[in-house]
Amino acid sequence: MKSCNELKKEMLDKKTWAVVGASVNKDKYGYKVWKKLEQLEYETYPINPNYKEIDGQRCYKSLNELPKKPDVINFIIPPTAILDLLPIAKEMGVQYLWCQPGAANEEVVLKAKELGFIIAYNVCVLVELG
């Protein structure tokens, strides 16, 4: 079994990310995480049904709308909302899930593992990327 650090590095080496809970509010983590990934030249797909675009980039209403499968889905939404998206992520064939601190609870972690996902949780992309 991989260590937490090996797992984080493996995920951060993947270059196509969906950020569920992306935000236009520059003070929110949903904006900061998406922007950091974008600045580091990751291919990023912001997802939030409340916005048409963020900083000029199209914002998608749902995972189902994405033009391609992301390598990693980053969640910045409440655990109950994540539970609803796990079956969709599974259908898409996504392998990696990253839950920002506060996004995952025990139920999300257990369900994700049960569905065969590799999941990082209670770790911040911003911290890991410096």
Image: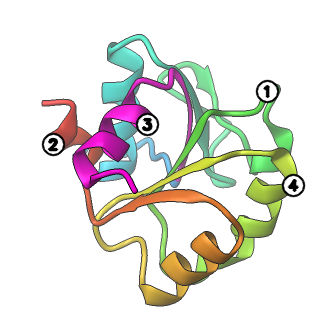
> What residue type is disc 3 on?
Met
Is 4 included in the stretch rendered in magenta?
yes
Q: Where is residue 107 in the image (x, y as percent from the top left)?
A: 53, 88
Left or right of 78? Residue 96 is right
Measuring 71% from the left and 70% from the top, which residue is drawn there?
A: 115
Q: Mark 1 points at which residue?
A: 68
Q: Residue 91 carries which label?
A: 4
| Quarter the C terminus occupies | top left
The residues colored magenta run 1-20
Is 128 included in the stretch rendered in magenta?
no
> What residue type is disc 4 on?
Glu
Measure the C-alpha gap from mark 2 to mark 4: 30 Å
Measuring 63% from the left and 80% from the top, which residue is drawn there?
A: 111
Mark 2 touches mark 1? (CB < 8 Å): no
Q: Which of marks 4 and 3 is nearer the N terminus?
A: 3
Q: How crowded is mark 4: few (under 14 residues within 10 Å), some or many (20 or more)?
A: few
Q: Nearer the viewer, mark 4 or mark 1?
A: 4
Q: Is residue 122 above or below residue 55?
A: below
Residue 33, by quadrant, is top left
Measure the C-alpha gap from mark 2 to mark 3: 14 Å
Q: Name the residue under label 2.
A: 127
Q: Which of marks 3 and 1 is in front?
A: 3
Q: Is residue 43 above or below residue 76?
A: above
Measure the C-alpha gap from mark 2 to mark 1: 27 Å
Kindly state the secondary structure of the residue where label 3 is placed: helix
Q: Which of marks 3 and 1 is nearer the N terminus?
A: 3
Measure the C-alpha gap from mark 3 to mark 1: 17 Å
Q: Nearer the viewer, residue 84 or 115?
A: 115
Q: Where is residue 57 in the image (x, y as percent from the top left)?
A: 59, 21
Q: Residue 11 carries which label?
A: 3
